[in-house]
């Protein structure tokens, strides 16, 4: 089992900007730098700009943070790393206010940082759940503004928990008559669904669970039909008709997950906000699914982050980005930069510049 880095290990490994940058470079280009424009591999590391490579093929300059969620960040890399470490090691999650106090930024900044990481946490390589999966719905109150004491509505959440044998970590054999004993949850999925209709529930199941899986559910009629259809598309339906009181006994793990998720929402986030609910659930599932691999999850958080498209404030609040920020306009000509000996185009080699100087007509 990989334990998370301790505080002293973390500080020894990432003491400064250079150490953080080397880590990002190693993870973003494990086989060496690749130019995002021309896919060329030959590049020079610039001395004049921090952590930036200039492609020897097309002349494009790329910093290790460009085109990632760290795009155009004004914060030190150490702040980003410290945040990733806190996200990975806080078993309850961390609120914007707690983070602000820890890393010494304003609460707004901390809030945006957390949202950028949350957006990057959507693991695109993840495999669908399989084996035996408990699945159920619950409702939670949410607010749009104000305090958690005055919720404004309720929203339906669906949860799926992959259960495995406590010792072997293998899926238990499907048994329609007995409870699955000695199990533990392995991975979970949580999502907001518009309602509890067949269409909404089937869509969630098809997106998150592999066909052939045994679905352990209550007697809800919306699950009907999932065990029909083509052989490579259908599921095994194990529906247990239970009274309200016994649901937490038959569907033990999914109810446990719901209870923990709600406690997390009330305790850490002081109630869920409707707008970001999907991302909070994503973060909760991310942390849950990696709870035995905390150390890895730090790398994963940053690794994913480096692989992610820029996710600016506009994207977080769902506003159209300003054209010159998150979506910079395409440059028709190479960028010109001020250097000690005049303006220089990106990619213009020294020699070309000297020729340029020689060709200039003599004054007078
Ligand atoms: Zn290039």
Image (cartoon, rainbow, N blue to C red):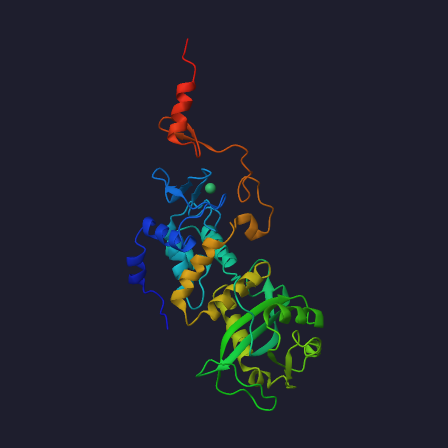
- For the residue pair 270 and 308, the one nearer the viewer reads as 308
- The image position of residue 89, as x and y in percent, is 39, 65
Residue occupying the far bottom of the picture: 177
Count of residue discs = 0
Left or right, 107 with reference to 19: right
- The image position of residue 80, as x and y in percent, is 40, 53
Q: Residue at x 52, y 57 (%)?
A: 119
- Residue 76 seen: yes
Above or below, 57 against 117 in this view is above
Above or below, 81 against 62 in this view is below
Dividing the image into 4 quarters, which one contains the N terminus?
Answer: bottom left
Q: Residue at x 45, y 65 (%)?
A: 93
Q: Residue at x 52, y 63 (%)?
A: 125
- Residue 104 seen: no
Dividing the image into 4 quarters, which one contains the C terminus?
Answer: top left
- The image position of residue 73, as x and y in percent, is 44, 46
- For the residue pair 293 and 124, the one nearer the viewer reads as 124
Q: Residue at x 50, y 54 (%)?
A: 308
- For the residue pair 244 and 349, the one nearer the viewer reads as 349
Above or below, 97 against 126 in this view is above
- For the residue pair 79 and 143, the one nearer the viewer reads as 79
């Amino acid at each position: 089992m990989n334990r998370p880095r301790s505080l002293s290990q973390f500080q020894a490994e990432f003491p400064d900007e250079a150490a953080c940058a080397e880590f990002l470079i190693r993870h973003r280009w494990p086989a060496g730098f690749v130019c995002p424009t021309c896919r060329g591999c030959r590049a020079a590391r610039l001395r004049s700009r921090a952590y930036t490579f200039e492609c020897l093929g097309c002349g494009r300059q790329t910093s290790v943070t460009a085109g990632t969620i760290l795009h155009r960040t004004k914060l030190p890399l150490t702040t980003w790393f410290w945040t990733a470490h806190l996200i990975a090691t806080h078993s309850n999650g961390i609120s914007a206010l707690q983070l602000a106090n820890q890393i010494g930024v304003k609460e707004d900044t901390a809030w945006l940082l957390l949202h950028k990481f949350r957006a990057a946490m959507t693991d695109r390589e993840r495999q669908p759940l399989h084996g035996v999966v408990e699945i159920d719905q619950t409702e939670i109150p949410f607010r749009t503004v104000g305090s958690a004491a005055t919720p404004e509505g309720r929203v339906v959440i669906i949860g799926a928990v992959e259960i495995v044998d406590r010792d072997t970590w293998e899926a238990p054999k499907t048994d329609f008559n007995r409870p699955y004993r000695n199990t533990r949850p392995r991975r979970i999925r949580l999502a907001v669904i518009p309602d509890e209709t067949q269409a909404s529930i089937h869509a969630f199941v098809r997106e998150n669970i592999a066909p052939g899986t045994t679905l352990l559910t209550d007697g809800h009629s919306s699950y009907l039909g999932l065990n029909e259809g083509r052989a490579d598309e259908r599921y095994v339906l194990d529906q247990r008709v239970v009274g309200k009181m016994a649901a937490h006994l038959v569907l033990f793990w999914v109810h446990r997950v719901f209870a923990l998720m709600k406690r997390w929402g009330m305790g850490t986030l002081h109630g869920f906000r409707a707008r970001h609910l999907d991302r909070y659930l994503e973060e909760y599932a991310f942390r849950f699914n990696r709870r035995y691999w905390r150390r890895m999850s730090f790398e994963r958080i940053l690794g994913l982050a480096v692989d992610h498209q820029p996710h600016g404030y506009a994207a977080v609040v769902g506003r159209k980005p300003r054209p010159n920020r998150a979506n910079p306009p395409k440059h028709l000509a190479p960028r010109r930069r001020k250097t000690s000996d005049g303006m220089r185009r990106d990619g213009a080699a020294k020699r070309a510049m000297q020729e340029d100087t020689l060709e200039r007509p003599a004054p007078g």
